[in-house]
Amino acid sequence: MAEFEKRAWWNLCVAVGAVVLFAAFWIVTRKPAASAGAFGILGLSGMPFFRLRQPASDERDREIDRKSMMAAMSLFWILIVIGAVGMGVRLGWDTLVQVPVWAFSAVIWGGWIVILTAKSAASIRMYRAG
Amino acid sequence: MPGKGEVVRNNIRRLRFDAGEMTQEQLGKLAGVTRHTIMAIEGGKYDPSLLLAFRIARAFGKNVEDVFIFAP
């Protein structure tokens, strides 16, 4: 398995792990605000990049990285548009809403999770395809 | 990237054999890429850049057209 494929697997596990941990904490504690602390493990997604000796990358790794980032950003953009427009259509454009800070924060974490998951999954798929 | 119906074939497996069973790792080192990339090129799953194609050909002491064959 290529070094960068291993990184993709690692990041995918971190992203899925954060969601699972958040859900598990929420179910057990019934406190979503405190459970949002589970998103802290997303910091582990950067861990492979702090290694002193970085693995060598070649043109194929860079192409897969570029394509997977493009796929992730496209998905993120689609979700942003659906979310932004959907909210206005469903709730009404002039409606005032109140959300707890944890929910607002979770949406931001969620954005990062979407990008991380989509990029990792796309990378793994491309490495598997050849 | 090849168009519809266009394929770039290669003789890397045979050339490695002719070069005394040169390993993919060795070829990768000579061409400046990883073993995984050589594997993908050899299997026809990845089309190398022009520069990499020249490097691979040079590793075998051949011309590019002796290693890669464009089959429209």
Image (spheres, grey):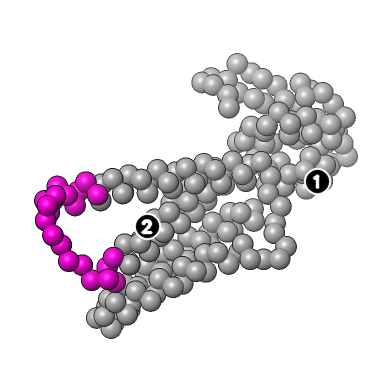
Mark 2, chain letter?
Answer: A
Which residue is denoted by mark 2 in the rendering?
A111
Asked if residue B55 lies left or right of residue A100, the reply is: right
Q: Secondary structure at mark 2?
A: helix
Residue at screen point 37% across, 57% down: A111
Residue A85 spot, x, y in % from top left: 21, 46
Quickly name the residue at label 1: B29
In this view, the residue in front, B68 or A70, is: A70
Distance Cα–Cα, label 2 vs label 1: 39 Å
Tell me if residue A110 can be seen: yes
Is residue B10 visible in this depiction of the protein? Answer: no
**Residues under numbered marks 2 and 1 in contact, where contact means CB atoms less than 8 Å apart:** no
Residue shown at 14% from the left, 49% from the top:
A93
The percent position of residue A20, horizontal first and vertical second, equals 37, 70
Numbered circle sitting on residue B18: none
- Secondary structure beneath dot 1 equals helix
Q: Is A41 situated above or below A67?
A: below
Viewer-nearest of labels 2 and 1?
2
Q: Residue at x 62, y 35 (%)?
A: B46
Q: Name the quadrant containing residue B65.
A: top right
Residue A26, image x, y percentages = 29, 77
Q: Nearer the viewer, residue A128 or A39?
A: A39
- Magenta stretch: includes residue A113: no
Displayed quadrant of residue A64: top right
What stretch of residues is rendered in magenta? Answer: A84-104
Please report the residue visible at 71 percent of the width from the left and 41 percent of the height from the top.
B38
- Amino acid type of the residue tagged 1 in the rendering: Lys
Residue B44, relative to residue A22: is it above or below? above
| Chain of the residue under label 1 | B
Left or right placement of residue A42 versus residue B30 in this view: left
Q: Locate residue B63 relative to residue A58 in the image: left or right.
A: right
Q: For the C terminus of chain B, give its image quadrant.
A: top right
